[in-house]
Amino acid sequence: MSVRTRFAPSPTGYLHVGGLRTALYAFLFARQHQGTFILRIEDTDQSRKVEGATEKLIDALQWAGVEFDEGPGKEGAYGPYIQSQRLQIYHDHIKQLLEQGKAYRCFCSAERLEQLRAGGAAMYDRHCRSIRAEDANARVAAGEPHVVRMMIPDEGEVRFHDEVRGDVEIACSTIDDQVLLKTDGFPTYHLAVVVDDHTMAVTHVIRGEEWLPSTPKHILLYRYFGWEIPKFAHLPLLLNPDKSKLSKRQGDVAVEDYRAKGYLKAALVNFVAFLGWNPGDEREIFSMAELTRDFSIERVGKAGAVFNIDKLNWMNQQHIKAAPASELLPLIRPLLIEKQWDALPDAYLLQVIELMKERVVVTGDFVTTCPYFYEDPASYDETSRAKNWKPETPAQMRSLIARLETLSTFDAASIEASLRTTAEEQKVGAGKLIHPMRLSISGAANGPSLFHLAEVLGKETVLRRMKRTLEVFT
RNA sequence: GCUCCCGUCGUCUAGGGGUUAGGACACGAGCUUUUCAAGCUUGCGACACGGGUUCGAUUCCCGUCGGGAGUACCA
């Protein structure tokens, strides 16, 4: 039987980074087994409907390179892939459970349940279990609102093997008579996952650890239906720095946020993959292809992992350094346009990127940390000016300008030679010219190699800026 | 409260009955350099605790403690 995995998010309006990791693992697992990866939208809570959420989810997933084989807009043989479009299927299965006495109708009001809880009850008191089927049917026929609850055995325990956690066992006496069908006719998560995973022929249920405690309910449902039980793999949670479940309020959780902040998809995917998994050796920088080759569910850890932004930053830096400038350009161009720096030719920007690649953390840094590539300095670093612009500097700069003006080839080597010759002539160290020149052509105290910087800027710009500084600094 | 899960440097982790407990991020120092980064070298830094089992436990077992999740007609 071929492997089929799925990612089944509820459409909340964005893709959570924890969700991205879950999706990634399920995707990688399917890929390496020549299996199928499914996207299913779990929108059974009508009160939490968010407009456009599914599109956003798909968009984020596709951006990250987690491609589903079946799902909304990619109908396979098992659709529809949106739960709100599968109501009839759930009703058919509820009917079956009802007929077989594996579920019962419950007419308890919300108020009664509240009172129960207020009275200290941890679970439903199974009040409606004793209603005879004929009576229940009559009340339903009369239009009385109700839910359908699952009949949990009084005794025994449910055991199952989890692919990451090993054997887990829970006593039935601690399991509540779970609501399967809500008053509004929509299924709860518990009914819908089981029915969908089975009818979509899912072989491996890979999901977050928050589902571990309810897995026995799901196992029981599989048994009630007489279905084969899939393999389960519950992934450790992603944590806030304070070790609670990763949530917004303590930082960004949406994949879209990281994308907007200038993280490369390769870095985010790499980072998130390593939260709970590692290859067993000391390699850390992985492409999607390498992850697909080396990932294994057996090596997934059990403990939750803190989402550490420092490590992500480092990883992003590594991926940016390794990426060809041509791949970075399309990510940076829009940021420049936002700043009205839109008339710059590709060839020029490619050089800028090449020069800046090693000193950048997020793509936005290509713009914000080096505005001097895009316009003449509007101001000059005061500390550097105080330290490096001495009374004798203007004269030295003037002779440097004169020498640079004679250059027919304005490349780093020639510029450097000109500067060093001028320094010798002036009987000063090269540093005495380097720092003022950097300040005058960039306005900044630091940045890429001065000579390469000047080469990229070009002769005309460099000379214009140097002359202008001479005026501004008098 | 109850149920379940988890517990190696601050963080991500490797390892596993006998190791100088390894790597990465972060942090400190040095080298390199025209600056800032990057890079290289280096330092700091961990087996939660208590009992067993054993010649020997960080590793296996039990307990405690700590953390987390679940406990909805949310997923």
Image: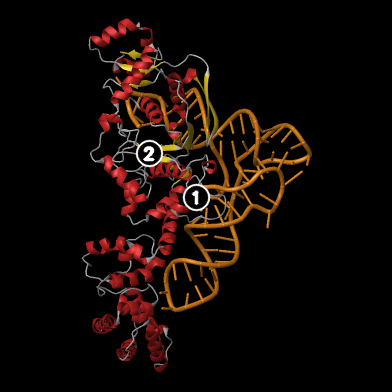
> Residue A441 or B39: which is nearer the viewer?
B39
| First in sequence: mark 2 vs mark 1 | 2
Chain at tag 2: A
Give the residue type at disc 2. Ile
Residue A462 left/right relative to B3: left
Chain at tag 1: A
> Residue B39 or A55: which is nearer the viewer?
A55
Secondary structure, mark 1, is helix
The numbered mark at residue A38 is 2
> Residue A468 or A213: which is nearer the viewer?
A213
Task: Identify which residue is drawn at 40% across, 30% down.
Answer: A197
Residue A461 left/right relative to A156: left
Residue A287 left/right relative to A456: right
Observer able to see residue A144: yes
Q: Horizontal and vertical percent for residue A423?
A: 40, 89
Give the residue type at disc 1. Arg
Q: Where is residue A263, by image quadrant?
A: bottom left
Secondary structure, mark 2, is strand
Image height of A108 relative to A316, above or below: above
Image height of A438 relative to A134, above or below: below
Residue located beneath label 1 in the image: A293
Q: Where is residue A310, by image quadrant?
A: bottom left
Q: How crowded is mark 1: few (under 14 residues within 10 Å), some or many (20 or more)?
A: few
